[in-house]
Image: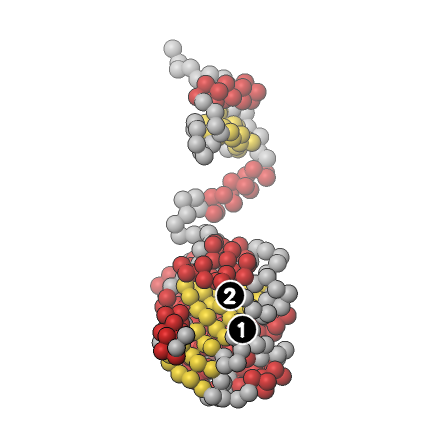
Amino acid sequence: MSTRSELKALRREYGDLLESHGGRRLEEFKRYEKDPESFIREVLKAEPWEAQVAISEDVLKSPLVCVKSGNGLGKDWLAAHLALWWTYARRGLVLVTGPTQKQVREIVMGEVAMAWGKAGDLPGELYTTALRVPGDDKAGIISFTSTEVSRLTGHHADRIMVIITEGQGCPPFAYEAAYRCAVGANDRMLVVGNPNSRSCTFAQLFESDAWSQHTISCFDCPNVLQGEEVIRGMMTLQGIARIESEYGKGSGVYAAAVLGEFPSEDSEALIRRYWLEQSAERFRAGTQSDDPPIIAVDPARYGNDKTACAIKRGNQIGKCETWSQRDLMESVDRVVDAAERAGVQPYRENP
């Protein structure tokens, strides 16, 4: 392949070439292999704050790390700096994915570009969506959106780190592809996001014992602790006050954006969580009732839907029976049987 053809192929794969460095020899970075914090401070000339240091140390030892946080706390900044550490100090391949092109190219890769440029002497070629390291085809950074997730499984290296940004917005198949890619004993997965909803794969990570979990509140931020903007662009007391004024401390928005916690219920939920909690409390109390039992039926026929049948006594619902793939008369027989067992009497209007 000619040089011109190779350049065209690289541009199709990685976008425009932004910058190229000669830099130091790769062997010089090996001493940071087990010290991401020192790499960030000494090589990248950056100052991570306490929560970022803790996450960096965890990525060093844990294969699966997930981070949920309030807004403006430097998740993508840290992801970019750890990507560079993995590339140069561990001579590994980093695969970055997220739900939108803006999030991946402009934010994460933008952070990579700023850190790489600030270091000044890191060898390689920086593209719009990738970083290539000379002399090592298995080390570098490649980024793409979760809609291009088929590209995720096409890369192989001795050490792979998969970084998923805006984890709350990535579909389940993006996570599945990441699991299939990070299969080596030394591989890593780092997922960062905002806890906006419980109804996503990102939320499930925080219910799994397999994942090392981190939660960062805006009240942990140096800007908030010190009452002034010591780190530009991060959350401030004024920012917290604006969110509180608009949505209130008890809102789901405040829980996610400020506290870094999943809201107690999703704003679009049909059934409120506290309704279920109150119902469960009444059920545990086991209050007896002399009211006659009533049967409730939600019928279905063929297909994936199910017929549901439950008995109500007073303010309590007993066991709900379900079945599927039955014709109408078969369902009628089952409803009659359930009613007879529960002592349900046929409804009769007063004469």
Instruction: Tell me: 273 left or right of 288.
Output: left
Q: Quadrant of residue 271?
A: top left
Percent across and percent down for residue 216 are: 52, 68
Which residue is outermost to the front? 1
| In the image, residue 177 above or below residue 134 | above
- Nearer to us in this view, 186 or 270: 186
**Residue at 51% from the left image edge and 30% from the top image edge:** 322
What residue would you read off at disc 2? 155
Q: Which mark is residue 138?
A: 1
Percent across and percent down for residue 299 are: 43, 27
Q: Quadrant of residue 170?
A: bottom left
- Image quarter of the C terminus: top left
Q: CA distance from mark 1 to mark 2?
A: 9 Å
Task: Say which amino acid is labelled 1.
Answer: Lys
| In the image, residue 328 above or below residue 182 | above
Mark 1 or 2, nearer chain start: 1
Percent across and percent down for residue 324 are: 49, 29
Marks 1 and 2: CB-CB under 8 Å?
no
Task: Say which amino acid is labelled 2.
Answer: His
